[in-house]
Amino acid sequence: MKSPTFRRVAILSLFSVCLIVSTIGAQQLAQNSNSDGTTARLVCKMIERFHINQDSINDEMSSRLVDRYIEDLDPNKLYFLQSDIDKFNASRKKLDDQLLSGDTSFATQVFERYIELMEQQVNIAHQYIDIDHDFDVEEEMTTDADELPWAQTAEERNERWRKRVKYELLDLKLEDKELADAREQLHRRYRTISSNLRLTDDHEVVEMYLTALARCFDPHSSYMSPQTLEDFQINMRLSLEGIGAQLRYEDGFTVVAEVVAGGAADKDGRLKPGDKIVAVAQEEGDFVDIIEMKLKDVVRLIRGPKGTIVRLKVKKGETSEQSVYDLTRQKIELTEAEVKGEILDLQQRIGQTLKVGVINIPSFYRDFAGAQAGAKDFKSTEKDVRKVLRDFDQQGGVDLVVIDLRNNGGGALSEAVGVSGLFIKEGPVVQVKELDGSIRSHEDENPDVAYTGPLMVICNRLSASASEIFAGVIKDYNRGIIVGDTTTHGKGTVQNVMPVSDPVFRLRLFQGEDRGALKLTIQQFYRVNGDSTQNRGVRSDVVLPSRIDHMDLGESFLDNALAFDRINPARGVYNTGLSSAEFAQQLQQASQNRVSQNSEFQKLNKQIARLVERKNRDTISLQESVLAAQRELEEQESDELFPTIEGDAESGDKKDKEVFPQTFYNDEILEIAADYYSLLKQAKVVQGGRVAP
């Protein structure tokens, strides 16, 4: 029996927090402690100087930090007792002074207690896996940690663990696993947790602690160690240098999960999914045994400059035969996250005589280093969108363009401005409030318009930040219509990634030790109409039923989120006449009429009603007959619809995914597009797919 996403709300996020301080010599520990203290002082200085709120690190922030750090470690209240919390609370108004002086001992104190309890409770979990549970008894487990107080006694805490393990066993049992197999799977899960405890570098504790501090100011600020910063930069430039293989950690082994098409491993042909990499060596030098090594450390051994050789000792997944592969690293393009486009003939999809160009923008990426170095081929969302629009023209043009921003969490502000400029001739794109309270307008600096015809933008609750800037421009210029969830995510802030250094001497060429970077909220942005997108987002002109529209997704659900506010509208905004309130009303009514008659949307609306009902529950049954009946009902309600609602392609090889797969939800979007084009023609706004003079 297949289990949908929401069923796993009660399963622990254990793997994300399984950390332990490395055992190192006393001298090295002292050096690291001094280094961490310096990093902490510098981070505090930078937050106070550069955060948009200009707040101080004081007793109030200290109190927030105690709660934030404890919750990050133990969100489900399964480890700490109330007595532990009482001890930690003794520092509630002391952490500000400690951090400003470079003292991070509280982080270590709390973390060491957490690790002690984690090891203890994992051992208890192994015992509960093997006992005989009565799945016929009527009992429930609380799934909302906010409804739980901290356990007063070890017995009370262990009872929570008994129910937790019982639920995990029952969950696997209802997926038609034999009880013996379910037990072995859980034992493997908890053995992995235990092994992960031994794989944490000491800097990770400080990274978690300083990130908790930054998030006391707002939910998008964080501290990144040098290692985390490297991963962040890879995501922004959509490329890395290595062998082209996705890896996973499994029972102490590094296992090949997928070989990236076109990469070095793919071209070599020997490395296959399921193979275990047991040792790594460079072109010259000895092999390093990587069994039980942390996955991200393995990845760093394998990554390296293109043209260099890495040697892998591999145990074949099928035969356990061991071989050595020499692979020449090359530049790997992360094409899954880049802009893609296709032209749809609506005659084939919905029986309408219309050609629609769909452009999917997964994120607003930019290779800042490549751009700064003057590279002609640096990765840029604006460049890639322009190329797709040019391809549309070369294929004979389109009547309407659809920009799909679903699940696009944002990215570079400069790319949001650049992409917006492809669709407007001139004028402001976004207004930004600086640290001193002044307002600066970012203008479309390129008078060239890449596409002048009708435009539709698809958004959902996961469209955030730069996505909302673009959607806001299209709405405020009446440049097109917004379709999707009720509103977007509601993130109206700008973060800057700055190297950790003394803010007084930031312009020095040599800053000494690499201390990572601070991703800090330094600006707020506003639409050209003066509204912030903060908390409220950009509302859709045409709203379609959606499950995620009813989930607790969005800025307003995040701790310490900044408030909505408004400034004066920008000057020089031009009404293109390609949308209006009247158009939106007519399109919404026509869509509602179709949706009400569509059997798939009727199923979806039933799912939404069930989702809302489940969301309001704070317990889950541990009685097999009750839980099985609930699951059976959910299966009957076609849970397989959920991925297509989110706009994802069907399962299969990633490289073969469609840009805009044929689903009932996407087909309704195309119906709206056809209605929109028809309204524009009736109003003589467009003629033959072009803007009327």
Image: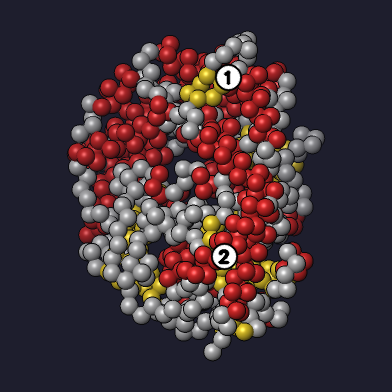
Q: Is residue 612 left or right of residue 354?
A: left
User: Who's the residue at 73% across and 25% down the image?
Assistant: 176
Q: Is residue 473 left or right of residue 175?
A: left
What quarter of the picture does the C terminus occupy? bottom right
Label 1, label 2: how far apart the Cα atoms are: 46 Å
| Amino acid at the residue labelled 2 | Leu
Asked if 606 appears above or below 617 in the picture, the reply is: below
Residue 86 visible to the viewer? yes
Q: Identify the residue under disc 2.
A: 587
Q: Please, what secondary structure does the residue beneath circle 2 have?
A: helix
Residue 349: give x, y in percent of width and height: 74, 64
Asked if 527 appears above or below 12 in the picture, the reply is: below
Q: Please, what secondary structure does the residue beneath circle 1 have?
A: loop
Please give the label number shown on residue 586: none
Q: Identify the residue under disc 1.
A: 622
Q: Is residue 45 left or right of residue 227?
A: left
Residue 512 visible to the viewer? no
| Amino acid at the residue labelled 1 | Leu
User: Who's the residue at 67% across and 31% down the image?
Assistant: 633
Say which of marks 1 and 2 sits in front. 2
Residue 98: give x, y in percent of width and height: 22, 37
Asked if 259 appears above or below 623 in the picture, the reply is: below
Is 389 in front, or is 414? 389
Tally of numbered discs: 2
Residue 522: give x, y in percent of width and height: 31, 59
